[in-house]
Amino acid sequence: MFSHVMLGTNDIDQSKIFYDNLLGSLGAKPGVVDDKGRLIYMHDDSIFLLTLPIDGQPATHANGSTLGFACSSVEQVDAWHAAGVANGGKSIEDPPGVRNSRVGDVYLAYLRDPAGNKLCGLHRMA
């Protein structure tokens, strides 16, 4: 359904450190910066980008928005969360753990990236 996801940032270098480690915990290679200054990650047929806003205004996070990253196991969610916290992210909401939902149990962890974007590591449990 989606071709890519792009988030705003005010600091490409800080975002690269954070996301190289966060996405590296999911098996992604380090991001590359293109000729327009966008930080690009390509992994498992997905494209994730970070950019300085083209209007010249500061990047801000959207209240109520969350970007979820699929994880293959509980351990991978925990590694994702630890990599984020160790590289400038902030753990938010409840600690990583199982949440019961109508569509089945999931193991979740939430972070804010250095620009304030809300992220979720998610593993669908059997």
Image (cartoon, rainbow, N blue to C red):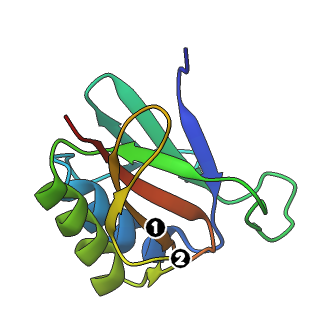
Q: Is residue 104 above or below residue 14?
A: above
The residue tagged 2 is 93
Q: Is residue 79 left or right of residue 41?
A: left
**Quadrant where the N terminus is found in the figure:** top right
Residue 124, image x and y in percent?
Answer: 29, 39
Answer few, some or many: residues within 10 Å of disc 1's Cα (few below 14, many 20 plus, some between 14 and 19): many
Residue 39 seen in render: no
Q: Is residue 110 above or below residue 101?
A: below
Q: Quadrant of residue 81?
A: bottom left
Residue 11, image x and y in percent?
Answer: 57, 74
Q: Amino acid at mark 1?
A: Tyr
Q: What residue appears at the point 25 percent right and 27 percent down from the top-left corner?
A: 44
Q: What residue appears at the point 47 percent right and 71 percent down from the top-left corner?
A: 111
Mark sitting earlier along the chain (2/1): 2
User: Pointers 2 and 1 in contact (CB under 8 A)?
Assistant: yes
Residue 86, image x and y in percent?
Answer: 28, 85
The residue tagged 1 is 110
Q: Is residue 124 left or right of residue 28?
A: right
Q: Give the camera-side residue of 7 and 64.
A: 64
Gap in Å between the C-alphas at discs 2 and 1? 7 Å
Q: List the single residue furthest toward the top.
A: 1
Residue 26, image x and y in percent?
Answer: 20, 50
Q: Is residue 97 left or right of residue 102?
A: left
